[in-house]
Image (tube, grey):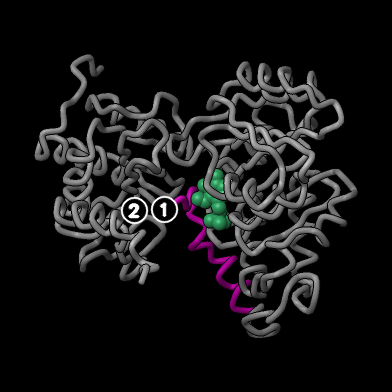
Amino acid sequence: MASLFSKFEGLAGALGSVVAAGGRNPFAVVIEKPISSTVGIIEGRETLLFGTNNYLGLSQSERAIKAAQAAAATCGVGTTGSRIANGTQSLHRSLERQIADFFKRRDAMVFSTGYQANLGMISALAGKDDFLLLDADSHASIYDGSRLSAAQVIRFRHNSPDDLYKRLKRLDAPNSAKLIVVEGIYSMTGNVAPMAEFAAVKRETGAYLMVDEAHSFGVLGEHGRGAAEAEGVEADVDFVVGTFSKSLGTVGGYCVSDHPELELVRLNCRPYMFTASLPPEVIAATGAALEDMIAHPELRQQLMSNAAHLHAGFMKLGLNASKRVSPVIAVTLDTVEQAIPMWNRLLKLGVYVNLSLPPATPDSRPLLRCSVMATHTPEQIDQAIAVFGQAAVDCGVPLQANAA
Ligand code: PMP
C-alpha cells in the first residue's frame, strides 16, 4: 500500500546530510531563555542574536509587557472565536483604528498572522477573471495566497518595473482587474523595492498595487510607514499588508486601505473568517508596541546606523554581503558545503544568524541571513564581525580579494 510519507524521503535524506555536515539540526535551534532583545541562551551559552527580525527590540518593550498583563487580567487570554463571530472585542477594533491612523488610511483589518494577511487579501481580492502580477522573489505567503485565489498568476523579474510593465502591456485583457504585489524589503536578501518606479507602472497601466511592508514597517520612511513612504508614493498604494511579528515584536498581521470595500472583504476572506482572532494580550501588547515605536523615532535611526556598521564590517572582511544597507544583511556563500559548517561555527562562537538553503533562496545559493536591531550595541556588532571573520577562516570560506 502506498505510504503517505514516501514523499518525505528526499527531505529526510537532505536533512540527514545537513545534520551530518554540522552536528546539529539548524532548523531545531531552541532559545532556552531570552536574556534581552539581543542575547539569548542557546545550548547553555549566552549567544548574540543576529537573526530574529526583532528590528526595534520591541519584543521586550516594558510598555507592551505591562499592556499584555493588564489585558489578560481584564479580558482573559483568548477570544475563542473568529473575527466575524464572537472574536471581535473592543480591543480589536481600537487596534484597527490605531493601525489605520498610523498609516493615514481609512480602515484596517487585523489578521491572526502576517501570513494570513497575505493569504486572505490576495485570495479575496483576485478572482478568476483577474490577474496577479507577483515579483519572482515573493514570500511564500504571497504565492500561497495566489494559489488560494482563482486568478491567473504572472511572475515578473525580481525588482524589475520594466519587466512588470512589459508583461502588463502584453496582456490583452481590458476587462480584467490586475493586482501587482511587491514587498518593501525582501526578507532573504534585504533588497528594497523601487517603489516610485512600481507606482509609475501602476499609474500607467491602471493596475492595483499591494505592498507587503513586513520587513520595512517601522524601518523605512520618516515615520516608519515603509518603502512606499520612503519614496513618497503612498497615494499610489491601494493595499498595505504587514505583520506585527517583526518591528513590533508581537504577532499578527494587517491590511490597511482607503478603499471602502475593505469592509466587504472581511466577509469574503477565508483566512480572516475561519480562524480564531488574536488574544487580548497580543492585541494590547501590539497597540502599546506601536505607541512605543511612534514615541521613539530615534530607534529607526539607531537601527540604520547599526545596519551600516555591520555592513561595513562585512565588506571590510571581504564577505559577499548584500549590496545595499538595510537591516537585513545576507552573506551569500557559493556552496551548501561551505554554508553549513560556517553557520555551525558561528553558533559555536556565540552568534546566531539564520541559515537559508536552496531552494528557499533567491539565486540557488545558500545565505547566512543576519537581521540587525536598534538595540544591538556597537560592541555586540564588533563582536559579530570578529566572529564572522574567525568562522570564515576556520571553515576555509574564501574572502574577496578586493575588500576595502
Ligand atoms: N511577508 C513577508 C515578506 C515575511 O517575511 C513574512 C514572515 N517571514 C510574512 C509576510 C508573514 O508574517 P508572519 O510571521 O506574521 O506570519
The structure residue drawn at horizontal position 64% and vertical position 80%, both measured from the top left corner, is 78
Q: Is residue 286 magenta?
A: no
Residue type marked 1: Thr
Residue drawn 62% across the image and 34% down it: 134
Q: Could you tell me the amino acid type at mark 2?
A: Leu
Q: Quadrant of residue 171?
A: top right
- Residue 214 vertical placement versus 29 (above, below): above
- Residue farthest right in this picture: 260
**Residue 403 x, y percent position in the rendering:** 23, 18
Residue 49: in sight, yes or no? yes
- Label 1: few (<14), some (14–19) or many (≥20) C-alpha neighbours in 10 Å: many
Instruction: Tell me the element at label 1.
Output: loop
The answer to which of 252 and 16 lies nearer the viewer is 16
Q: Which residue is mark 2?
A: 49
When asked about the image quadrant of residue 323, the answer is: top left
* Residue at figure coordinates x 44%, y 25% from the top left: 324
Q: Which residue appears farthest toward the front when viewing the image?
A: 1
Give the label on residue 52, or none: 1
Whether residue 245 can be seen here: no
Q: Which residues are magenta?
A: 53-70
Decide: marks 2, 1 in contact (CB < 8 A)?
A: yes
- Residue 244, position in %: x, y? 60, 56
Dominant secondary structure (helix, strand or loop) of the stretch shown in magenta:
helix
Question: Helix, strand, or loop for circle 2?
Answer: strand
Q: Residue at x 27, y 56 (%)?
A: 26
For the residues labelled 2 and 1, the Cα–Cα distance comes to 7 Å
Quadrant of image for the N terminus: bottom left
Q: Position of residue 89 (x, y in %)?
A: 78, 75
